[in-house]
Every structure is written in C-alpha cells, then in structure tokens.
Image (tube, rainbow, N blue to C red):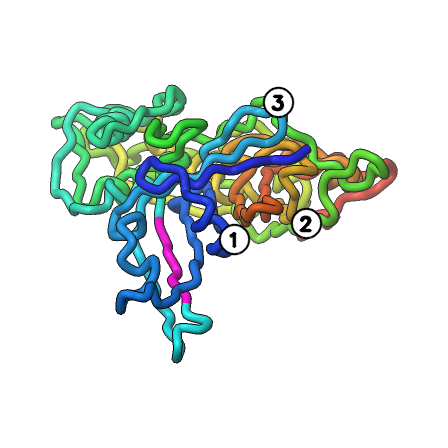
C-alpha cells in the first residue's frame, strides 16, 4: 500500500515547488544519539541579484522542521521534529549545479544551549530527568521512573551537574542502563522525553519477512554477533556513610532486561568474561544499578541491518520498538529491538535503512554441540 509524507517548515506544509525541487529527505532516529535531518536544494539566480532559498526564512537558524509519515491505512508517525543548525552552500560558475544543504537536529538541541553548574539534593535520577524535561515543555515518559536510582541525599552524596542539560541526562542514563532521547509520536510540537530502560517485553509491532514468496517485506538482511563483551561484573566500593571497611560488593551476571530469545551471551559463547567496577555510590542498590548498566550495554551482542520499503512493509519502524524477523533460521529469527532507522524519502518512495539489536540468540539447532564448547 502507498505511503504519504508531510514536510513542515515552521508549522506550514512545504509547497509543491519546494517538494519538486529538493532532493530526498534524509531523517535518522537513534536510540542513543540525537535525531537528525538533511535535505539538499538546487540553488539558482532569483533574477534580482540574489540566490534562491539561501535567504529563505524557512531555512534560517533554529527554524523548525518536522516530518510526518502516514503508511496506507495506518496512523501518522512524526519521525522528526527539530531545528535547523547548519547550512552548507555550494556555488558553481553560472549557478549551474549549485546547491544548498540544510541539516538539523531534534528538539533535544534546545537542552544543549547552556552549560549549568547545579547541585541536585534529595532527588532520584528520574526526578532530575523529569524536572529538566518539564523545563522545556517536554512531556516525561511514564517509564522514566522504572528502575530508578536511590535518592541523592545531603548526608551522603548530592548530585552535581556541570554540563548542559542534555549532556547531563545522557551521562546519568548511561550509568543507569537507560536510554535518553527526545521524540514525538504523531503530532509535531508534542514531544516526549525518554529516560528509561529499553522496553523489550512488548509484542512485536511488525514482522520482517525474508523468504515468504508472496508476503516478503525485506530483500536482504545482514547479521553479526560479537562475543568479546563482559558477561559478569564484580563491583566493590566503600560507603561514605558506613564505617565498615569492607563496604559493599556485587557479583552480577543479570542485566535486569528480559532476553529477546533463548541463549544469552554467556550461554551462546560458552565462555564468561568478567570485569571489575569501582564507582562512587551510597548503597548496594546503587552499585547493583551501575553493574547492571555495564551488562545492558554489553548485552546487545547481536546486530541485524537491512532496508525496508514503507509501502511494502506498510509500517514505519520506530526506535525503541520490538520487531520480529522470520525466515532467518533458528539462531537469527525472532524478536529484535529497533536501535536506529535512517529514512530516505521522496515523492516516489520511502526507504528505511535500519539497525536492530538483541541480547540473545535463538535455540541451537537440534543435535548441535556448544558454539565454542567452553575454553580452559
């Protein structure tokens, strides 16, 4: 089924003249990087001694750009809502072949305009995130308070910020094993702030069919795995508010995320890899959270990349959702977490180059031995 898109500039739809002139829109969503947009427009002499589009108010600094996509018969999806940050003008003699390249970033850039020095007291990390999101009119996700940190109190360690708001939140997110980003769902201007652990528990939103002769939805998929990652974290730390010289210690093999299939990293590789962690914490719970964050990041040891056509798939892949792959064999078929999507959109087609990850492999084929058989 066909899909349509709408390109909005400062809230107004792009006119047919601009849509016909410009090259494909490129939009990228990413789980741990800001969303971005890029487009290229031919430049010509406007007949009055100036150049077309170069002084256009729609492409001036911090002009708002948004892209909304609607697959056939489906709900609209706002895949980008952000601001113009960079223009690159290429001029050739006589203006033939001259172009203007416009690049922008999602609304999280507004949280990067000022570096702050601030002490946060008697709050958890999620409290901080939700407060900061609220300062920018961004609605905090309901999932932000799940797996929250302990409160940072004055009698232990308060939380010191010496960075821009988005830099600070991304730092907190990484040490909590969470993902931090700003995105919209269907309506530009209505933004959600995510400071949450990856949600891998939901049902797949779409199925990528590789080998069905009549219902295939992707032409090719590339898979890779990397087992050179830690499977166990040993952590120890003396506590500021406890005189016990042994402090607290954690020996952890579980990241706190459900597995997307049967074989986790240690099971699949047949070998464990242990790392040691020392971090300034105030409790065993906080140390456990830090150790889990190491294992969560390491646990995405399986990666799949490919391309899908929105019209063929009749769906828009969104970062943070779960999809299913069929037709890739017992090890590689199954559920995956959408990590990034790069959209290439013009008036004829909408292609999505995607990266999927997961923290497990499928069941070993019947009668197979261990993958590595265990190392001495």
Seen at 40% across and 38% down, the residue is: 13
Which is more foreground, mark 2 or mark 1? 1
Ranked by sequence position, the earlier of labels 3 and 2 is 3
Magenta stretch, main secondary structure, is: strand
Seen at 56% across and 36% down, the residue is: 4
Q: Can residue 272 be seen in this view?
A: no
- From the viewer's side, name the closer residue of 39 and 289: 39
Helix, strand or loop at mark 2: strand
The residues tagged by marks 3 and 2 sit, at their Cα atoms, a distance apart of 22 Å
Q: Mark 2 points at which residue?
A: 223
Magenta stretch holds residue 232? no
Circles 2, 1 touching at the beta carbon (< 8 Å): no
Q: What stretch is highlighted in magenta?
A: 99-104
Q: Mark 1 points at which residue?
A: 24
Task: Place residue 161 in its image quadrant.
Answer: top left
Magenta stretch holds residue 102? yes
Q: Is residue 134 visible?
A: yes
Question: Is 355 positioned to the left or the right of 119 in the image?
Answer: right
Seen at 37% across and 73% down, the residue is: 91
Seen at 41% across and 66% down, the residue is: 99
Q: Name the residue under label 3.
A: 203
């Amino acid at each position: 089924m066909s899909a349509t898109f709408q390109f909005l500039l400062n809230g107004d739809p792009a006119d047919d003249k601009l849509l016909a002139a410009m090259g494909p829109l490129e939009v990228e969503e990413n789980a741990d990087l800001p969303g971005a947009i890029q487009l290229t427009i031919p430049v010509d002499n406007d007949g009055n001694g100036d150049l077309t589009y170069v002084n256009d108010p729609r492409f001036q600094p911090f002009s708002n750009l948004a892209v909304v996509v609607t697959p056939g018969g489906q709900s609209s999806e706002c895949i980008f809502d952000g601001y113009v940050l960079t223009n690159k003008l290429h001029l050739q003699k006589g203006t033939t072949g001259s172009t203007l390249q416009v690049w922008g970033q999602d609304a999280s850039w507004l949280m990067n305009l000022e570096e702050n020095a601030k002490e946060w007291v008697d709050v958890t990390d999620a409290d901080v995130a939700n407060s900061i999101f609220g300062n920018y009119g961004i609605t905090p996700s309901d999932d932000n308070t799940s797996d929250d940190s302990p409160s940072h109190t004055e009698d232990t360690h308060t939380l010191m910020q010496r960075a821009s708001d988005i830099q600070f939140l991304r730092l907190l997110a990484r040490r909590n094993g969470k993902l931090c980003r700003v995105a919209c769902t269907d309506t530009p201007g209505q933004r959600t702030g995510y400071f949450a652990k990856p949600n891998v528990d939901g049902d797949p939103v779409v199925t990528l069919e590789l080998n069905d002769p009549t219902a295939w939805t992707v032409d090719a998929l590339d898979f890779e795995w990397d087992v050179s990652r830690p499977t166990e974290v040993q952590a120890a730390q003396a506590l500021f508010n406890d005189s016990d010289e042994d402090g607290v210690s954690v020996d952890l093999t579980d990241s706190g995320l459900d597995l997307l299939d049967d074989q986790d990293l240690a099971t699949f590789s047949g070998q464990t890899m242990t790392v040691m962690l020392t971090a300034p914490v105030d409790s065993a719970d906080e140390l456990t959270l830090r150790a889990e964050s190491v294992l969560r990041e390491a646990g995405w040891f399986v990666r799949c990349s490919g391309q899908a056509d929105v019209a063929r798939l009749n769906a828009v892949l969104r970062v943070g959702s779960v999809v299913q792959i069929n037709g890739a064999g017992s090890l590689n078929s199954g559920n995956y977490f959408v990590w990034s999507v790069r959209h290439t959109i013009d008036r004829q087609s909408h292609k999505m180059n995607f990266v999927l990850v997961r923290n497990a492999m499928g069941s070993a084929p019947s009668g197979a031995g261990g993958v590595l058989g265990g190392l001495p």
